[in-house]
Amino acid sequence: MAAILYFAEEVFGMHLYLPVALTSVNVLMPIGLGLMVGLLSGLFGVGGGFLMTPLLIMLGIPSTVAAATDSNQIVAASTSGTYAHWRVGNVDFKMGFYLLVGGFSGGLLGVQAMKLLKATGNADFVIKMTYVFMLGLVGVYMLYESLSSMKKKKAAAMAEVVVEPPRKESGFAKLLGRLPLQTRFEKSGVSHSVILPIFFGALVGVLAAIMGVGGGFLMVPVMVYILRMPMHVVVGTSLFQILFTCIEVTFLQAYTNHSVDFVLAVLLLLGSTVGAQIGAVFGRKLKADQLKVYLAAIVLLVTVKIVFDLTLTPSHLLGMGGGH
Amino acid sequence: MKSLKTAIIASLFVIAGLTFPVGGAQASLTARANHDHIKIDFFYNGSEVSVRGIQDPGVDLIVKLTSPDSNQDLKKKGKVSGFLWMNVGEIKFDNVPNLYFAQSSKKVDEILSKDEQDKYLVGYEALAKRAGVSPVASPEEKAKWFDEFVKLKESNKLYFVTDGGFTTNPDEPGKGYYMKFQWPYQAPPGDYLVTVYAVKGGKVIEQATSKVNVEQVGAVKTLADMARKNGAIYGGLSVLVAILAGFGVGLVFGKGGGAH
């Protein structure tokens, strides 16, 4: 017993020094954070960057290192999550590929847009406003849509197996149907022009680059509401897309900014890979609308937090340079 | 971990030996820092640096621990549209140390004149007078931003100024001095200078110095060097380990779980 207590004291009080962040952390903090964010990743198909990066900064990690290292751990969590979803046939690789093509192009455009914004000195304002607007819009819409859908149980049941937009054939849907290069996405059970996932992938890529996140929380609604994919395929496919985006980001951050902390990433991924697996298991036990309500609630909570940060007087009027 | 920390704080007692009598005083002041070489390994979580030595009776002491002066660019926050707090530009601080600790045996203003404080850079006021802050429109604005700078540094445990905390040197009962600083893990690798001032009649009559070197060692140094010098290999390795870890955990859960 004494040996167990001694071991617990040693482990729980154990600090590790992070060679790139140049700081020391209690190992339980990043592992716990990783577990929590990995759980969300496996459940909802989001990378969790919009949650993890601010939490790491609160732990005392410099913002540039926090963002870059978060990308590195998302590679692990999304590999773990993609693998779990792939085993049960929930990854639409074809759709994921087109979204990736768009996402990469959009990311490049977004980086250029950021350079322009930084040159004009308005970058921080645009980033914060994009965050509040996009998170608020996505959160409110998802919450409204899934709550009203849950009220109509029949509609909720249909959302699981929907093939084509069943209700009204809107003008927008007709327009999408007339686009060239139509193809069938068997896994998702939908037909679209390849232009559609490439275009929306690019749009998310631009926003993700501006906001400095992977864009999972934007990509998921695009797949659900515009591409009309079933929720469980959405989660697996989103993780697949996030995996490749974060591989690219991690490598570029390590190569150009030297801001990836490998030790921190390992601590985070110890938690996040396990969390992603648990999330994938729980996700299958929840209904699609329940998943959407929970994701919407988290997105709205983050929005409220950012609004507070923006409006309450900060404790320090100076901050370290870099990152956002 | 305490045992590890104790091991780290092991006694590397080095007599620092430089003493400078000021103004021809016949005095003997010594300073030595335990652990003049702090090694940062994976289990490093800050340390403790104690300073001890001998001083003449009847003098007061001020111990200062600083890093070399540097220029620091920070982001300043301000209100946009009257209610939104965000970064509104950069502000540059010149001739400021990244780390500054000062501890005196009594309140500094009671034992050292303002001119001497400025001359020997003792206290925040002296630091503020020498620091360059730009862009600022007025001396009041400079003072405001320097105060914010100190607040930020204090919250990162890189600055403090205090008095008291001196005890008798256990090596020299009755006549020596002994005090200690908590060394923060936030202090980056580099060379730091310990200066001890013997003060009498509002003036510094003697000073002694000692050096503290903080250095990354072992795997911490290897990783930090690789991140800086071989970004491509480091990035590739980071990605590879993450993918393998993700697959590894996936396989473990896949075999044992059966929940899918």
Image: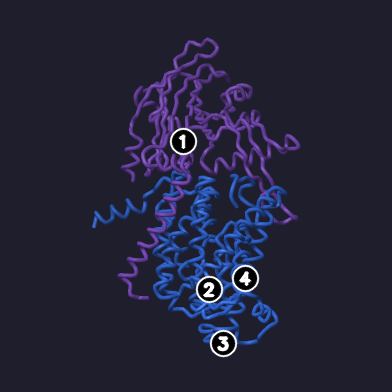
Chain colours: A blue, B purple
Instruction: For marks 2 and 4, give the one nearer the viewer.
Output: 4
Q: Amino acid at mark 3?
A: Ala
Determine which residue is flagged by label 2. A294
Q: Residues within 10 Å of mark 4 (few under 14, many from 20)?
A: some
Assign a secondary structure to mark 3. Answer: helix
As measured in the structure, the alpha-carbon distance from the residue carrying label 1 to the one carrying label 2 is 45 Å
Quarter location, residue A165? bottom right
Residue B206 position in % (x across, y down): 51, 17
Residue A237 position in % (x across, y down): 50, 70
Q: Would residue A303 be visible to someone looking at this image?
A: no
Specify the label residue A155 is tagged with. 3
Determine which residue is flagged by label 4. A195
Q: How many marks?
A: 4
Assign a secondary structure to mark 4. Answer: helix
Q: Chain of mark 1?
A: B
Instruction: For marks 3 and 4, give the one nearer the viewer.
Output: 4
Q: Residues within 10 Å of mark 1 (few under 14, many from 20)?
A: some
Residue A135 position in % (x across, y down): 62, 66
As measured in the structure, the alpha-carbon distance from the residue carrying label 4 to the one carrying label 1 is 52 Å
Please determine whether, in this image, residue B36 is positioned above or below residue A45.
above
Q: Earlier in the sequence, mark 2 or mark 4?
A: 4
Specify the label residue A110 is tagged with. none
Q: Amino acid at mark 4?
A: Ile
Determine which residue is flagged by label 1. B189
As measured in the structure, the alpha-carbon distance from the residue carrying label 3 to the one carrying label 4 is 29 Å
> Between residues A224 and A278, which one lies in front from this camera angle?
A224
